[in-house]
Image (cartoon, grey):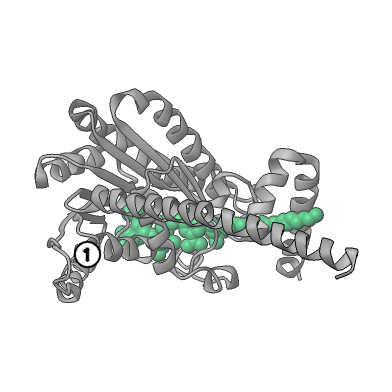
């Protein structure tokens, strides 16, 4: 054997030896990771199973899908909305869907309008009477808006702010003392990517979601030592009735299914992500695609570029409207 081929075979032997000595560590590492994920899943399930979960805006879209996934996960649901008939239909549907694999509960319903803060307080009492306490409050209900700052009446700003910001604020404040007293509870809010970045022709909506983000960030810090968890979830476009139900500059209903909404994420998929985020007690979750996520980072790291991009977006969007 030549000196070169001898060296090669010594080298190969050394490599193989290294390889086999690394295998037990790699397998051990994978095992620990798997065990960790399993434990996480068990913890997540335990957080939801039998928990009293309130969902606002449960009659439609994301709220309805959240009702389906939390019901299947064994939560004791209290479904809220303005339309009693639609909520009752959902209760019936959930009862029919139960497959007996896991213990499920027939949901309760509470109807109220979030824009009327006086009735929110009495609705909170009704909610607390259902099971004596609330484990998880999911502030999901909301409304969007289409319009220019120049032409939008201040009452429209107040309406959007009332439903998206003051409503969840009032409901959370009314439920919170009972959570603090039990030193246990979880407050969740469905915000939006537009709680982190502001896009043109959405001033009322983006402002309400930015306020929501700020309020619940303050709350998270204030109640951290009191046993209460806060989760803010910021989704990108979801295929729901949001754009159809949006209000316009004069307060009338927009009534159009925008392409961005129609091509948005499946609400069931988003509801499953909400279930995971809540089960994992995550503080802040962005559920958006690459471009909106990039936009959130650009807004923070290079605001001048972000403002240019938004001005160009405004120019492009305004043109067809003017034509
Ligand atoms: N769809 C999307 O692209 C995105 C949505 N979101 C957020 O998701 C949440 C759910 O919206 P989504 O499911 O998409 O939209 P939908 O329009 O399908 O559902 C909105 C829900 O909010 C309820 N609601 C509206 N106004 C009031 C009110 N005054 N009082 C009580 N309940 C009210 C509605 O109930 P009612 O039956 O009484 O009308 C309905 O159940 C909102 O907070 C929205 O901002 C966030 C990011 C993207
Ligand atoms: C140099 C590279 C630049 C790349 C940056 C790209 C910037 C792209 C801008 C993306 C804007 C995303 C807006 C997302 C808005 C969104 O997802 O909102 C969710 C909602 O709440 C929807 O409500 P709406 O009523 O507006 O339908």
Image x and y of residue 271, in percent: 38, 61
Could you say which is closer to the camera, residue 119 or residue 296?
296
Image x and y of residue 259, in percent: 59, 73
Q: Quadrant of the C terminus?
A: bottom right
Left or right: 180 as drawn, with respect to 32: left
Residue drawn at 70 percent across, 67 percent down: 321
Residue linked to disc 1: 87
Left or right: 81 as drawn, with respect to 122: right
Image x and y of residue 12, in percent: 74, 63
Q: Secondary structure at mark 1?
A: helix
Query: Does ligand 1 reach within 8 Å of label 1's beta carbon?
Result: yes
Residue found farthest to the front: 1
Left or right: 133 as drawn, with respect to 218: left
Could you say which is closer to the camera, residue 101 or residue 256?
101
Question: Quarter-wise, where is residue 299 in the image?
Answer: top right
Residue drawn at 10 percent across, 45 percent down: 131
Could you say which is closer to the camera, residue 121 or residue 263?
263
Image x and y of residue 309, in percent: 77, 52
Could you say which is closer to the camera, residue 4 or residue 284?
4
Left or right: 291 as drawn, with respect to 182: right
């Amino acid at each position: 054997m030549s000196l070169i081929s001898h060296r090669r075979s010594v080298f190969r032997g050394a490599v193989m030896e290294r390889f086999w000595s690394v295998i037990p560590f790699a397998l051990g590492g994978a095992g620990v990771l798997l065990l960790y994920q399993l434990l996480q899943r068990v913890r997540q399930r335990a957080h939801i199973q039998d928990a009293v979960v309130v969902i606002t805006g449960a009659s439609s879209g994301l709220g309805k899908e959240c009702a389906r996934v939390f019901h299947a996960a064994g939560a004791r649901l209290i479904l809220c909305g303005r339309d009693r008939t639609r909520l009752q239909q959902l209760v019936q549907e959930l009862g029919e869907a139960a497959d007996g694999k896991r213990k499920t509960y027939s949901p309760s319903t509470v109807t109220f309008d979030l824009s009327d803060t006086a009735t929110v307080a009495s609705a909170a009492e009704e909610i607390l009477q259902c099971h004596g306490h609330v484990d998880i409050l999911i502030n999901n209900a909301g409304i969007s808006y289409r319009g220019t700052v120049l032409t939008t009446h201040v009452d429209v700003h107040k309406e959007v702010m009332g439903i998206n910001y003051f409503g969840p604020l009032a409901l959370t404040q009314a439920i919170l003392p009972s959570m603090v007293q039990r030193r246990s509870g979880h407050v969740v809010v469905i915000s939006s990517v537009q709680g982190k970045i502001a896009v043109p022709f959405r001033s009322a909506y983006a402002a309400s979601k930015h306020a929501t983000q700020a309020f619940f960030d303050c709350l998270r810090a204030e109640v951290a030592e009191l046993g209460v968890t806060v989760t803010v979830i910021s989704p990108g476009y979801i295929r729901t009735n949001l754009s159809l139900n949006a209000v316009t500059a004069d307060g009338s209903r927009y009534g159009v299914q925008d392409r961005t909404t129609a091509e948005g994420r499946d609400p069931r998929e988003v509801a499953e992500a909400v279930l995971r985020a809540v089960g994992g007690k995550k503080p802040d979750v962005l559920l958006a695609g690459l471009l909106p996520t990039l936009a959130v980072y650009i807004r923070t790291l290079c605001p001048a570029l972000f403002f240019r991009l938004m001005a160009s977006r405004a120019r492009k969007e305004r043109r067809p409207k003017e034509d």
